[in-house]
Amino acid sequence: MTATLAAARRWAALTATIGGLAVLVAALPWLRDDDPARSVLRARLGEREPDPAALAAVRSELDLPAGPVQGAAQWLSGAVTGDLGRSWVDGSSVAETVAAAAGVSALLGGAAAVVAVAVGLLLGAPAAWTAASGRRPRAGFTAAALTALPEFVLAAVLITVVAVNWRLAPTAGWFGPSYLVLPALALGIPTGGLLARLLITAVEATAAEPWVHTWRAAGSGRGELAAALLRRAVTVVVTQVAVLFVGLLGGAVAVEQLFAIPGLGRIALHASLAQDLPLVQGCVLLLVIVGVAVGGLGIAVHRLLLGPAGAAASLIPAVPAHRRRGRRVAPIAAATLLLGVVVAGLLRDADRVRLGARLTGPSWAHPLGADPVGRDVLAQLGHGAVLTVGTAAAVTVVSLLAGLTIGLRGGAARAGAADILNALPPVFVGLVVAAILSPGLAAAALAAALVAWVPLGVHTRGLAEEVRASGYYRAAELCGAGPGRLLRRHLLPAVAGPVVLHALARVPATALTIAGLGFLGLGAGHDSPEWGAQLATAVAYLERAPLAVLGPVAGLGLLGVLAAAAPTASPAGSRSGTAPDTGRGETAPPAAPLTKAMT
Amino acid sequence: MATAATKSYGPRRVLDGVDLDIAAGDRLGILGASGAGKSTLLRLLLAVEAPDRGEIRFRDRPVRPARPGALAWFRRAVQLVPQDPYGSLSPRMTVAEIIAEPLECLRVPGDHRERVAELLAAVDLDPALARRRPAALSGGQRQRVAVARALAPRPEVLVADEPVSALDATVRVMVLDLLLEASERSGAALVMVSHDVAAVRRVCDRVAVLDRGRIAESGTVVDVFGAPGTNATRDLLAAVPRLPVGAA
Amino acid sequence: MKTVIIFAVLRLSRLSVRFADRVVVDDVDLAVGPGEAVGLIGGSGSGKTLTALGVLGLLPATAHATGSITVDGAELCGAPERRLRRVRGSRVGFIGQDALAALNPLATVGRHLRIPLRGHRGLSRREAAQECAHLLDRVGLPAETATAYPAQLSGGQRQRVAIALAAAGRPGLLIADEPTSALDPLTQAGVLGLLRDLPPADGGARPALLLISHDLAVVSQVCTRLAVMHAGRLVEEGDTAEVIAAPRHPYTRALVASARALAA
């Protein structure tokens, strides 16, 4: 297959995926197993059984079409002309609401992106300096630590410490530049950490390329070589950076909610919780457009940086196989600590309500204090872990099977679709799923699964492509091996090991996704010990009992350490570059004992 | 075997009306510089790709590329010794499994274990290596495994793709002699695609010189190398490094 | 017969290179005189490449070198990175195996040549551009090559660029590690000819050459003296014609026999 044909297929797949998403968004109000008019009344009045006259009035007022096909067509034709319909709740124009919110979100996102790039370069550039003298860059410990706290947890911590305790910045609102600082930091710092890790990994890989030898042998100065290494590394990671920035949009939902910023994410969240579907449609449409635009921008910048050096220059070398042991200490310690807390918590009674002990601080009776209804926080933490991590483990098994199956089928067409889905922040999916079904742990799990199979599928596809291109696979074909044998003897053995490890390594990240949805009210209910829900409850009482957030924050932070310890977070399947023979070079993530204990 | 085979990629015609005939027991070298069309011709001969025009015939039957697992009759009769002894053996299989692969895939009757032992002896490998994986083998040993695998289904034609270019100088002669001996003993024809004049001279009786997609010259090795008729052949011969005169 | 060289450009004495668990270069003595072409020959894993990397101070971080390496009389074994950086490119030039990867894909040929021209010879931008054209001419490439990226060149052209890069700092010694093993025979002959007959820089002497290869026939095209390495040790050394006529070590004998078997 020629390159142009492959490119054409990729574009076709891309267009098909975007088109599919558009139709899905358009048909959103009719995907619920319910009459939209009924939903509108419930959204407005909370009535269970509205009378037919009211329903008819709503239908004529909002001009609701009769069925999904008609509805989707009507919405799409409106969307093209900039008419996104009216809100079911207050009847205001969706386009106007979304446009106003988008300005706020753009400001926040821009500030966060600046923070992220600054943090990323600050932590990533020294790696090039180290590599320029032939030494291996340091493991990027600080970068890993920064990624350990997900945005919603970091935001809670920043509010608690900086805004409530030190009173250095406003806790919430949107009235001036000082209101931008904490949200931008909460949103930008974890992304900056990820960016730095990507950059460090790319520098490490670049430093192993043979031309570095040539440059050093020619007497290249250290600064000169460091600059060349950094330039090459940036060229390699820039498309993945675009994906990170799309992820920023997802994080913005929680951050805007916590800081009460009237941005797109917060509006989408409230619309989803109120099942105001036209508003959800409008927000999701805009977020998807921005996501695709940012992704396209990444590819454009990549091309620009490559310049006339051409396609040959995008050749990514094998990632060095040996990883330092030192990095394992932190994740192992985190896993042990987490396990200890969980076991201690599981032995305690989580459900006993002691109203007298509401929001009390740590004591012998309640080592981590009590929650707003007087339940023991340690016990809640232990029981919540089973919900959060157990669900994540189940989701992982399902997405592993899906990822392997879809990835092994291969083909450039599916690759394009996976690339788009890969860039979709899980929060969006959670928003849509919760708007269609109702919010709950099952909805959160479904949303997590819809997202989690993608990186596994991309990884599988990458490894399978390598095997298919390998000499031994072609030799087997010439030996007369049929498709079944090729799959059994050559593809599966090469692919299964690394992908299963990858899936295990993603369990903490999936748990964080589920907790994040729970935190937003899109997952487990507010009285559930599920960690995200627990944190949301504690945050509501932040001013009275700042210490109550400590338990869930610590638990989620430890999960974050485990997620960060997974071989470099690869939003775009960056590790498909490993050679097939060194497929075993993947580090075994310490998440394995944890999941065993949980299930 | 090939008749007027032509292959173009886009506007570039890589092979232009190549005719080749391979008889039983023939040892034919296909010689050419890089870009002459050697690898394309090889893919056509192995029925991995189809020519745009012309055809590949074997036992008077046309051969067309098909999905994996098909063409068993052809695969059984035509086997490849690949160029790269490092990439062409699965790192996850033992030597015995690798050699038995064509036997199993092509459902060759008989005791496979016995045949593998026989083949290991034929390529002069220690039987104890049967349970090792390729990573434990040297380059020369790996290439012997590749030869054994190709010989396993008792093919009528062995196709060798630059079989020694990735090997150390001292190992090259051994592997070339092994190929020659294997073809002599089994009566299989040998087609060796190479840019290496010395390797072709060592192993082949006949040679076809490929130049920019066409056969520039063909004939017996003695004739063609003794009195080259085209510049392509002369250039290739002139490029062979010679040992200093005083050494001879 | 060991050749005694008094004024050596490069002198290795008792050089050993170790990894944690094994010795890969074992007690090697070798000297290269000014303008001399010496071939270092051996099979894969014989330690010949690590010997060369040791001279340049480019051994992998896990390797440890002991003994003595002097270039123009200056000791390099165990020298700090800062001093090594001044030696690389200006005293010793290095030519690696041609893979596309041996040149930075994102840098033009001119950018590569500026590393030694500006870094070592302190030329101004304009002088460097002139010298660049001159260097490319010396290796038989047109001056326009300076604006090309490595991916736009053929294998032979890239290897000529690598030779120009190695010679740009006017070193007294060039080390070439399997410079032709990735090239087809026609191109190989051209590159070997260039290595043998590289025109000297204006007013300069021809640099000495240490050519590393596994192929006796290749080395004997260029070198007047041979050193044979086997399993980390230097097993034989002498005049090229003599070694080929009367090899003494069993490994050398095998080398000569296989070269003869494939020779014209």
Image (cartoon, coloured by chain):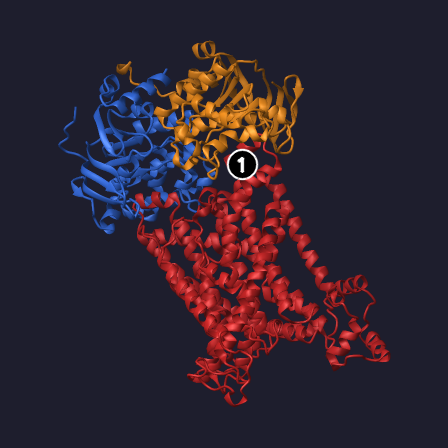
Chain colours: A red, B orange, C blue
Residue A329 location (% of width, % of height): 37, 62
Q: Position of residue B44 (x, y in %)?
A: 59, 26
Q: Quadrant of the N terminus of chain B?
A: top right
Chain for numbered disc 1: A
Q: Is residue A599 left or right of residue A228?
A: right
Q: Is residue A567 left or right of residue C230?
A: right
| Image point (45%, 36%), residue name | C153
Element carrying mark 1:
helix
Q: Which of the 4 quarters of the picture holds residue A196?
A: bottom left
Q: Is residue B139 above or below residue A211?
A: above
Instruction: List the residue tagged with mark 1.
Output: A473
Judge by depth and name the residue closer to the eye, A358 or A580.
Answer: A358
Is residue A329 visible to us here?
yes
How busy is the neighbourhood of tag 1: few (under 14 within 10 Å), some, or many (20 plus)? Answer: many
Q: Is residue A260 left or right of residue C163?
A: right
Task: In the rendered view, tell whether residue C211 sits above or below residue A413.
Answer: above
Q: Residue furthest bottom?
A: A356
